[in-house]
Image (tube, rainbow, N blue to C red):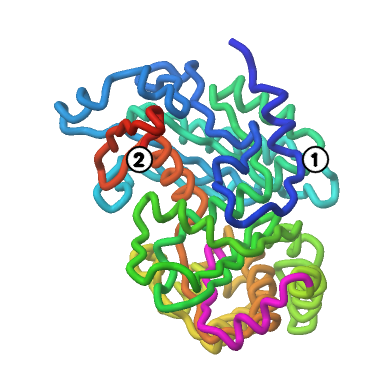
Amino acid sequence: MTGPSDNARTAAREPCGPKSSRDGAEDRQSTGDRPKAVSSELAGNLSVTDGKAADKQGPSLGHHRRRGKLPAYAALDLGTNNCRLLVARPSRRGFVVIDAFSRIIRLGEGLAHSGRLSEKAMDRTIHALKVCRDKMRRRGVKRSRLISTEACRIAENSDQFISRVFDQTGLELEIINRETEARLAVSGCASLLDPSCNGALIFDIGGGSSELIWLDLSERSRNWRASVYDRLEAQNCIEAWTSLPIGVVTLAEKFGGRDVSPEIFESMVDEVTTQLAPFEKKNALREKVTNGSAHLLGTSGTVTTIAGIKLELPAYDRKRVDGCWLLDAEVRDVSSSLIGMSYEDRVAQPCVGIDRADLVLAGCAILEALMRLWPCERLRVADRGLREGMLATMMAEDGYRGGHRRRRRRSRKSPDRGD
């Protein structure tokens, strides 16, 4: 068996500069950003499928319908801090999740200082990936996309890590560039956009990087629905985006995460503000946010943690957090309470815990910098993002809409065109 494609990894890691915000997402992806199949080494029900080739491999759609099942898709997001998996099937409202997995693996631990992924971090990650592999096998996944982000983009030994993952798990990871990461984030949380607003600033505070995307929704139809296809259409509303090489792990490692005084917190905010300034200078979003009908939309562990604390949940509850609205004053109240806590108190907080206790204030500092630069009264919380974006994209590419596969129509002018 051959290992991961060197050309694909290289293409995925090349920087991708801004392009026309109206281009289709598929046209703007490099070869390295195309969906990959799960390796055939997984055996069992996992077959190699990619794009339209899915029509020619494995059981037919009619076979699935006769058995009462539509094919299962998997999306894996391997970040600097987290390893997360979703397995889903197409449904009338987009897709329905049939399995999931999330584990904090801290792949990027120490990366900012050494430039390399550590052996312990790689061991933790591979163990989590084996769990994901087994879940996909049990669910009979037919098509998947397995992505890695900032930690693998910048680590000197990421190629060795990708090869090691392939050898030990049979999974072929794809290192995506920052633009693709931003676009997938938009697709993943598009259904939470307020249809009454003319703009939205979406942000994803990650472990090693943070993505910001400004959506111009002023020309969007008011009866716009966030189905699978509309998730992709939301990408065409992107007017500006950026990716900062700073996240909760990198910021906490630089300033410290266990003992954070108000002075250290302000230093964190200043650091992030300095990095955000060029994006604001280029795009003048402050005026659009403050003078127009706009809202913030956050997709990350930071905003979901803040929401869980604000809701006083005895244990984290995705159903209550995902889609909830927070006022800017409520966000700042939670941040202030966390600053006033000791590390041990943060560990005891049910929506923080030991895994996030040394990172949560770094995330709060990034969010505070965003809110100061782009004042906005309302923030919507999304416990969804890249994985949902990948699932929506794969299903749309395979022609699923509303749980059914769209049939191709032939026209006289364009016989090969599907509707």
Residue 417 percent coordinates (x, y): 40, 33
Q: Do the residues labelled 1 and 2 touch (CB within 8 Å)?
A: no
Identify the residue at the far right of this view. Answer: 114
Q: In this view, does 117 lie above or below 104?
A: above
Mark 1 vs mark 2: in front: 2
Quadrant location of the C terminus in the rendered image: top left
Q: Is residue 288 shown in magenta?
A: yes
Residue 331 percent coordinates (x, y): 55, 82
Which residue is located at x 78 percent, y 40 percent?
Answer: 155
Residue labelled with disc 1 = 116
- Secondary structure state at the residue bearing disc 1: loop
- Residue 419 image label: 2
Crowd class of label 1 (few under 14; some 14 to 19; many from 20; radius 10 Å): some
Q: Is residue 115 left or right of residue 389?
A: right
Give the CA distance from mark 1 to mark 2: 47 Å
Crowd class of label 2 (few under 14; some 14 to 19; many from 20; radius 10 Å): few
Number of labels in the image equals 2
Amino acid type at image mark 1: Arg
Which residue is located at x 53 percent, y 38 percent?
Answer: 128
Which residue is located at x 36 percent, y 23 percent?
Answer: 55
Q: Is residue 16 left or right of residue 89?
A: right
- Residue 170 image label: none
- Secondary structure state at the residue bearing disc 2: loop
Amino acid type at image mark 2: Asp
Residue 148 percent coordinates (x, y): 62, 41
Query: Counting residues from the N terminus, which is met first, the one under dot 1 or under dot 2?
Result: 1
Question: Magenta region: which residues?
Answer: 282-302
Q: In which quarter of the image is residue 87?
A: top left
Q: In this view, does 201 lie above or below 9?
A: below
Which residue is located at x 64 percent, y 18 percent?
Answer: 3
Q: Is residue 127 left or right of residue 316?
A: right
Decide which of 371, 23 is in the foreground and name it: 23
